[in-house]
Image (spheres, helix red, strand yellow):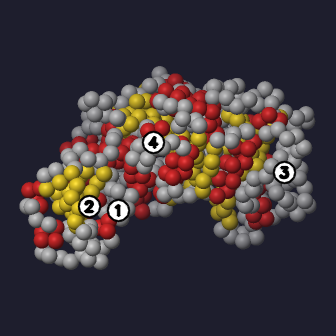
Amino acid sequence: MRRYVVSKLMSRRYQHSSVTGETCDSTRGGRASDWSKGGGEFVAAVRDHARDDAEGRARLVAAGRSPYGVGETVADVAVVAATASGVGVGVGTDGWLLAAPLVAAGETATLRVYGHLRAGVSLCDPVQVTQQSPHRVVPPCPLHTTCSACVHQHLDYNHQLTVKHSLLVAAYAALATPHQPVIIPPVLPSPRQIHARNKISVHHERVRANEPIAALGFLERGRHRKVVDVAHCPVADHAVNAGLAMIRKQVMGSTSTHSGLAATYMVRQTLLPTSDPPAPPVPTVSSTPSSSTSSNLAPKTMSLQDFVKVMKNKKKKPAGLDTKDPRPLHAILNQTPTTTVQQYPPENFSFYPVISRSAVVQDIVNGHVFRSPSNSFYQVNSYLLPTLCSYVTSQLSAHCSSADNTLIDAYCGTGLFAITQSHTFKNVIGIELDSDSIAWARQNAIDNGVSNVRFVGGDVAHLFDGVVSMVKQQQDTKETTTANIGDNLALIIDPPKKGCSRDFIEQVMRLQPRVIIYVSCNPESQIKDLQIMQQLARDGVPPASFKGNVGDMVVVSTAAAGGKSHKEKNGGSNNSDLEPESSRVLYLGTKKIVKDSDGVVKIMAVDSETQERPLVMPQAGLARTLLKVKGYKIVQVQPFDMFPHSHRIEVVTTLVRED
C-alpha cells in the first residue's frame, strides 16, 4: 500500500464563495465544513449504512497509509450516503471512505482521487456515474459540474426536499428525549426553484498589472482555485441577471494599473411600481466621472480601480419620502399590511437591478413595504418570505395567551419580523447592534404606519440590561415583576449563521419568555443553542451578576460542606475584599446561611433541589447559586427551502415554556 500523506487542506486559508457567501476552502477540497474537520462529517454520514468497516479504516489511519494513490481512478464505487452539504460518500477497501460531489446516494460511480484526510477519507472528482439514481435530472445550469454555487441541481426538486428533510430528522434527533420526540414535518418548498434569489455576489481573481479580466463569477467546484466565468445565473432572478450583465459590461476585459487587485461585486434587485419604459429610479452607481445616472454603464468609462471604489460606497442613510402626500408609504403604494400570505410580487410591480452598495432597495412582504441599504442583510428568497412571516404569526398567535403582551425581536435588522408581527402584539421591541439598520427599521415602521414598535440599538449579548425595565413600563401592570415578566412576553431570535452566544442564551433563560421563535439558516448552530438551553434548564443559570466560569465550579452538598462555613472549609481564607454578592454561603438542610463581607448573617429557607443549585468556586473559596429556571418544550420545527439547489435550509423552531 502507498504511503498516506496527510493533506495540507487542514491549514490552508479560506476564501469567500459564490452565490451564498459561504466560507470555502481555497484548496483542493470542498466547503470548509467538509474538509477542514478532518473528514468527520463523512464518517458520520456512513455510520448507519452497510459496509462501514470502522476498524479497518482505523488500522489504515494508524499506519499512516491509504489504499489509494493521488490520481488513481476507482471504479464501481457504491455511494451509500451523502453529507449535509451534498457530498456523496462511498466505502472502499478496508472501510476507507471515498467522497465526491455531484453523486447521489444509491448511485454507482467511477471516481478519481486527488487528496486524503486524516479520518480515513479520500477526496475525489466524479469521472462517470455508471448506475444513476432515478432522481437524477439534467441540471438547469450548464456550469453545474464546474461552478460551486449550487449543490443539488442534478437531483429533481422533490428529491432535494426529501434529502434535506432526512438530514434534518437525523440532526434534530439530538434534541429528542424519551418523553419528547422532535417531529420534523415536510420541508415547505420555494414557489420558485429557478430565478428565485434576489441577490448574488460575483468576483474576479487577483490580476496582474495591465492583465485583462477574463472571468467574473463564482469559485470553481472542489478546487476553489479559480473563478468560473458566469454570464447568467439560473438561480438568480431576471433583474439580478440584468445587473450582472451591467457589471460584466464594465469589468470584463478591464485592466488594472497595479497588480493584486481583486473585487467582489454585489448584485441585487428592488421592487417598484411598473414603469414604461422600465427604468430604475435610483442610479446604478452613485456617481461616475461623467456624472451619468444611466442604467446602462458605458464600457470602460472609468478605470477598474475607480469602478471598484464606486461600487463600495458607504451605506445610504434613511430619509422620508420626497412627496407632499402625507400618507405612509404603504398607502401611497396601495398596499394593505396583513398577517396572511399575499401575492408576490404584487400586481403592477416589477423588479429592477441594483449594483451600487450605496443604493436603496425595496421589497414588499404581505403588504408591508421595506426599504434598506443595498449592502445590508435581507432574506434572499422574496418568493417564500411571505409564507415564512405568516407562519411565524400563526405560531405566536397559537401560543401567546393574552392580547396584553410584548414581543422582543432580537437581531431585528431593518425590522422585518418586528413590523410584520406588530399586528398581534400590544408592544414590540426590536434590538439590533448595527446603528444603520436601526435607523432603517424606524423608517420602515413609519412607512408602514406602525406605532407600537420601538427599536433599540445595542449588542444582544447584553440584550436585557435595559429591556426588562422597558418591558415593565410597556406592560404597565402592578402585577408585572422581574420574576414574572416573561409570562406575557414572546421572543423572536434570528441570529447570524454562527448562532447565539452563551451569554445571550443565559439572559433568555433568566427572562423566561412564554414563547420563543428561533429562526435559523444553520440547523447545526440552532441545535447547539437549543442543547445549551436544555442544559441550563437542567442545571440552572448563573445570576446576572455572576462573572465567573461555571465550568470551574463543583456542586456543594450538605455532606460535602460538613456543616462548616466556607471560610473554615477553605483553611480560613479571608475574602473581606469581596463585594456583597460574593458573600460566603452555607447550605444546611433547607436553610441557606449567608454571611456578607460586613459580617452580617442572613438565614433563608430554600428548597435546594428545586429552587437553587449551590455551587462553589474552589480557587476563590466562594459559594455561588445557579438559579433554577423552567425549561422549554419544542412544539414545532418547520423547515423552509429558502435556498433551492443549495445544501442550506431555513428552520423555524417554536419553543413554549414548560410551566
Whether the residues at callouts 3 and 2 have beta carbons within 8 Å, the answer is no
Look at 21% across and 58% down and name the residue there: 603
- Observer-side mark, 2 or 4, equals 4
Look at 72% across and 57% down and name the residue there: 315
Residue 28 falls left or right of residue 312:
left
User: Distance of mark 3 from mark 4, alpha carbons?
Assistant: 54 Å
Residue 455 falls left or right of residue 347:
left
Q: Mark 3 points at which residue?
A: 283
Q: Which of the marked residues, 1 or 2, is nearer the chain's N terminus?
A: 1
- Observer-side mark, 3 or 2, equals 2
Q: Name the residue under label 1.
A: 546
Q: Which amino acid does label 3 sit on?
A: Pro
Question: Toward the viewer: 512 or 344?
Answer: 512
Check disc 2 and report its element: helix, strand or loop: strand
Residue 275 falls left or right of residue 187:
right
Q: Which amino acid does label 1 sit on?
A: Phe
**Residue 479: mark:** 4
Look at 10% across and 65% down and name the residue there: 564
Q: Which picture quadrant has residue 273?
A: top right
Q: Which of the marked residues, 3 or 1, is nearer the chain's N terminus?
A: 3
Q: Which of the marked residues, 3 or 4, is nearer the chain's N terminus?
A: 3
User: Distance of mark 1 from mark 4, alpha carbons?
Assistant: 27 Å
Q: Which of the marked residues, 3 or 2, is nearer the chain's N terminus?
A: 3
Q: What residue type is labelled 2?
A: Arg
- Answer above or below: position of 599 versus 99: below
Q: Mark 2 points at which residue?
A: 624
